[in-house]
Image: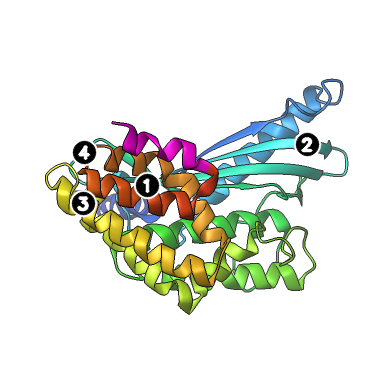
Amino acid sequence: MKNNLFIYLIITILYFSQAVFAQELQFEVTINDKQVASAQVGTSNKEAVTALQKNISDFLNNRKWTNDNYEGSEKITCRIQITLVRADFASGVYETNAQIQALRPVYNTKYETVLFSYVDRKFNFNFLPTQPLDLNFNENVYFSNLSSLLGYYAYIILALDYDSFAKAGGTPMIEKAFIVANTAQSAGADGWSQGDIRDRFWLVENLQSQQMLAVREAMYKYYRKGLDIYQDKRPEARTITLDLLKEIDKIARIKPNALLLNVFFDAKFQEFINIFKDGSQAEKQEAYTLLGRLDPARTSLYSRIISN
């Protein structure tokens, strides 16, 4: 009897240890239903929205996405806010947009840098509470557009996170995201076309491109040899950041309007302003010139760099 109890305790400990160390993502899931007519969101429909939120949270947070073990403190902090534009609760057809964001801690600080920030304006899917999402997701098989969307962004975030800690470290995750995109596209799922350069497909296309490899490697240096040492070695960090901008400048001449670069500047523009505002006059001017050319829509914001 005591032996059986001991075995049971060991199995329980192992089970909960796996639960603690398995999952990589810590997503906060928010669903905004304010744009849906108030008369449409009754008690039963509110329950459908709650079920949708829980299913998405469970799918992202309770599934193991890699073969690596993550401690609780190592989980990637993420947010997804889904705004319902139209919803047919009876049939489970949702037309939505989604803002997806992921953060990365900066070494030896309490600061978290924005790793990824993207608004998907074609985040459309079907969902019924009676047909919950299956956690046994496989990138090679099309289950539903919702599971493909969530799996795709999970792999994109993991790829960028791995890239930030090891040179081209996210390549296996990029390959998985590419398979998800192709599988969903082959199934005729909504929003996976290659028509608009802002469409989600181009995120993984850019990440897979050999032309972008130098940018990915420069981004790794920016995180590990720029941000992670910024507190102690600011001049070196600014030099690394300028090197990144110069590498992006080379690629932007070959692939103008590349979605990956636009998304990167959406996430980093304020950070760049903060990094260079304390630099030398030469650094400020060079950074301002590069940023104004690479991200012209924010030229007026970048002028803060040289205004001091």
For the point 47% across and 76% down, which residue is it? 211
Q: Is residue 234 visible?
A: yes
Residues under numbered marks 3 and 2 in contact, where contact means CB atoms less than 8 Å apart: no
The amino acid marked with disc number 2 is Val
Residue at label 1?
288
Magenta-span inclusion, residue 304: yes
Q: Please, what secondary structure does the residue beneath circle 1 have?
A: helix
| Along the viewing direction, whichever of 108 and 134 lies nearer the viewer | 108
Question: Reading the chain from its start, which is encountered first: label 4 or label 2?
Answer: 2
Magenta-highlighted residues = 298-308
Residue 164, given in percent of the width and then of the height, sits at: 33, 59
* Whole-number angstrom distance, CA of label 3 to CA of label 1: 16 Å
Location of the C terminus (image quadrant) = top left
Residue at label 4?
109
Check residue 85 in the rendering and tell me which mark sits there, or answer none. Answer: 2
* Whole-number angstrom distance, CA of label 3 to CA of label 4: 15 Å
Magenta-span inclusion, residue 29: no
Q: Please, what secondary structure does the residue beneath circle 3 have?
A: helix
Residues under numbered marks 4 and 1 in contact, where contact means CB atoms less than 8 Å apart: no
Question: Reading the chain from its start, which is encountered first: label 3 or label 4?
Answer: 4
Question: Reading the chain from its start, which is encountered first: label 3 or label 2?
Answer: 2
Check residue 237 in the rendering and tell me which mark sits there, or answer none. Answer: 3
The amino acid marked with disc number 3 is Ala
Magenta: main secondary structure equals helix
The amino acid marked with disc number 4 is Thr
| Dot 2 alpha-carbon crowd within 10 angstroms: few under 14, some 14 to 19, many 20 or more | some
* Whole-number angstrom distance, CA of label 3 to CA of label 2: 43 Å
| Along the viewing direction, whichever of 178 and 121 lies nearer the viewer | 121
